[in-house]
């Protein structure tokens, strides 16, 4: 039974790995640079695995989620700045994901977009209100597995496998190094987006992990995210095999689905849209919860889906307000795909403020006792901290210099 | 926080500056965009002609592509142009309008295989013409 539970958790993690930021940046990177940036995905996946394992372990041993650590380790002022940055990026991401859900529903039903935005908002609220935490995780994780259709599409598009293999070796072969750097930063930002660790660590507290769950934590983080990265490879290979050759700039979520429609026909198209729907729907719920978790943990309110709505009223009110704001923002006509690019780049700026406190707490033996970071976790943690600082400093200049990746 | 908000606004303003005068660089970028929309439209038309798409997907996605081409047509017609490339900009604007109209046909007839078949070659020709203007 235990192995079965672990397998279910891993499957959910694979399906839940990809969100709208990964979809947009992986396919666009493939359409612009072919397979050249596959190595960046590997770096991003290892990074999110290292820090997710760390914050899952902290949650299991100390019962503290990320924003408890932020408040404790950074103090009120810096902590508040981190909170504001995290909430702004969260809201942007949530808005993009809600818009993405509405677009997928429109591609499936043909109904008017604005009605579907409202329907998406109501559907998300109902799911969050009535469904238990682990079922939310599983329903959207399993649904997201439909994205495996892109792995089949990638094979059917007959990429040059030698070039794909070469893509895993860091190299630059372009006349546009700034654009290359912009996509590298975007891919890292999308893979290591902060809401993933907020959600992961808070989820561990929700599920009342203890020391006995450290194996599950490792398996979820390493195998789940590792195999989830496989979906990112597939998306980039589809971008490189189909769109680059034809000079297509995939600007719409529908364009990404075309990547499965061309090699696999109607069934490929439907699986792609359903997969994207579950991936962005699941990410919408993750970001919604993350926003409420962050605020509640920072101000010391009662929080958690397991407490039911009346047990954590301010937590419940926060996610309702965030959802209403996101639905309102999508209704203004903002383009979810463009907003995603801004959200990913701004989240890259906020990365150090999220990851430094995790590293500090994971090293604190007064909390973590014998479960504190070992040499390997610390070495990887510090290397990634350096990477995160570099991408956080370069993200906005690259956004401006490349005109949001346009040239 | 105030400084952060000001920086955010500045970034949005700078990054969003996609209008202004059409110079050679902008003409190249917009030509590539028109070629991209036409090529993607041709892929979609091909799938519709083979029965490999779905009614709602073809209808909605063709409309998205058509609207993007139409927006480019309007922008190219309205924006001031540097001397020497006015004729190419006018050509590209008309071409974007033509692509938009063809994609609108696909939007209106998302299950009609013969309409889709008849749109493939014109869209391919439009993509080639836009590619020429980008050189």
Image (cartoon, coloured by chain):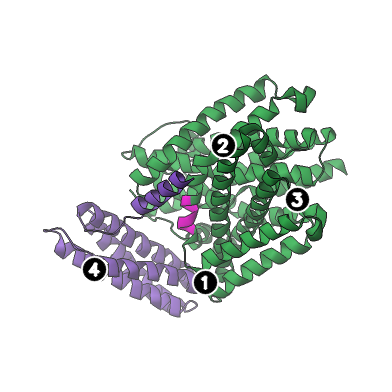
Chain colours: A green, B purple
Quadrant of the drawing holding the N terminus of chain A? top right
Which label lies toward us, 4 or 3?
3
Q: How many marks?
A: 4
In front here: A305 or A241? A305
On screen, residue A323 above or below A300: below
Residue plotted at (45% across, 79% down):
B109
- 3D distance between C-alphas at marks 4 and 3: 53 Å
Residue A345 x/y as whole percent? 47, 45
Numbered mark located on residue A162 in the image: none
Of all residues shown, which one is farthest toward the top?
A375
Q: Which label was assigned to residue B78?
A: 4
Residue at point 77%, 50% (across, down)? A302
Tell if the residue under mark 2 belongs to the same chain as the one under mark 1. no
Instruction: Determine the secondary structure under disc 1.
Output: loop
In the depicted structure, whether residue A336 falls above or below residue A187: below
Q: Which residue is mark 2?
A: A353
The one of A60 and A32 positioned closer to us in this rendering: A60
Number of other residues with Cα within 10 Å of mark 3, as a class: few under 14, some 14 to 19, many 20 or more: many
- How many residues crowd around disc 1 within 10 Å: few (fewer than 14), some, or many (20 or more)? some
Residue at numbered disc 1: B51
Q: With A154 as the anchor, is A206 left or right in this view?
A: right
Alpha carbon distance from label 2 to label 3: 22 Å
Residue under mark 4: which chain is it in?
Answer: B
Marks 4/3 in contact by CB < 8 Å: the verdict is: no
């Amino acid at each position: 039974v235990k192995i079965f539970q672990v397998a279910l958790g891993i499957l959910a993690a694979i399906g839940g790995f990809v969100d709208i930021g990964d979809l947009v940046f992986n396919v666009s990177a493939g359409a612009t640079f072919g397979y050249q940036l596959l190595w960046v995905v590997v770096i991003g996946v290892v990074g999110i695995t290292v820090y997710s394992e760390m914050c899952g372990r902290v949650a299991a041993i100390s019962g503290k989620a990320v924003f408890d650590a932020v408040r404790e380790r950074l103090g009120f002022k810096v902590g508040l700045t981190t909170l504001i940055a995290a909430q702004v990026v969260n809201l942007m991401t949530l808005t993009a994901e809600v818009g993405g859900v509405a677009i997928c529903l429109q591609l499936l039903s043909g109904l008017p977009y604005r009605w579907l935005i409202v329907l998406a908002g109501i559907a998300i609220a109902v799911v969050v209100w009535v469904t238990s935490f682990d079922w939310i995780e599983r329903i959207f994780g399993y649904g997201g597995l439909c994205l495996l259709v892109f792995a089949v599409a990638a094979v059917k598009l007959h990429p040059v496998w030698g070039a794909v293999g070469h893509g895993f070796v860091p190299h630059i072969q372009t006349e546009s190094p700034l654009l290359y750097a912009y996509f590298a930063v975007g891919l890292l930002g999308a893979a290591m987006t902060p809401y993933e660790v907020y959600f992961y660590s808070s989820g561990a507290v929700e599920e009342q992990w203890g020391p006995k769950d450290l194996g599950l934590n490792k398996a979820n983080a390493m195998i789940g995210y590792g195999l989830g990265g496989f979906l990112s490879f597939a998306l980039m290979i589809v971008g490189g095999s189909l769109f680059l050759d034809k000079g297509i700039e995939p600007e719409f979520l529908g364009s990404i689905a075309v990547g499965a429609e061309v090699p696999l026909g109607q069934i490929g198209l439907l699986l792609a849209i359903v997969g994207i729907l579950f991936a962005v729907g699941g990410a919408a719920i993750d970001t919604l919860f993350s926003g409420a978790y962050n605020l509640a943990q920072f101000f010391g309110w009662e929080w958690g889906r397991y407490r039911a709505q009346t047990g954590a009223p301010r937590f419940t009110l926060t996610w309702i307000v965030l959802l209403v704001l996101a639905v309102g923002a999508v209704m203004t006509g903002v383009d979810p795909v463009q907003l995603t690019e801004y959200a990913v780049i701004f989240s890259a700026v906020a990365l150090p403020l999220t990851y430094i406190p995790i590293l500090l707490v994971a090293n604190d033996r007064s909390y973590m006792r014998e479960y504190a970071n070992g040499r390997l976790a610390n070495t990887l943690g510090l290397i990634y901290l350096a990477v995160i600082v570099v991408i956080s400093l370069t993200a906005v200049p690259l956004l401006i210099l490349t005109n949001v990746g346009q040239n | 926080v105030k400084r952060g908000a000001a920086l955010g606004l500045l970034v949005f303003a700078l990054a969003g500056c996609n209008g202004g005068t059409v110079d050679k660089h902008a003409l190249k970028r917009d030509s590539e965009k028109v070629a991209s929309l036409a090529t993607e439209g041709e892929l979609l038309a091909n799938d519709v002609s083979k029965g490999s798409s779905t009614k709602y997907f073809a209808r909605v996605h063709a409309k998205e592509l058509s609207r993007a081409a139409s927006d480019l047509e309007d922008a190219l017609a309205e924006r001031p142009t540097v001397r020497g490339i006015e004729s190419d900009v006018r050509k590209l604007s008309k071409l974007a309008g033509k692509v938009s109209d063809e994609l609108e046909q696909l939007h209106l007839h998302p299950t009609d295989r013969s309409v889709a078949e008849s749109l493939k070659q014109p869209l391919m020709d439009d993509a080639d013409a836009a590619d020429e203007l980008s050189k």
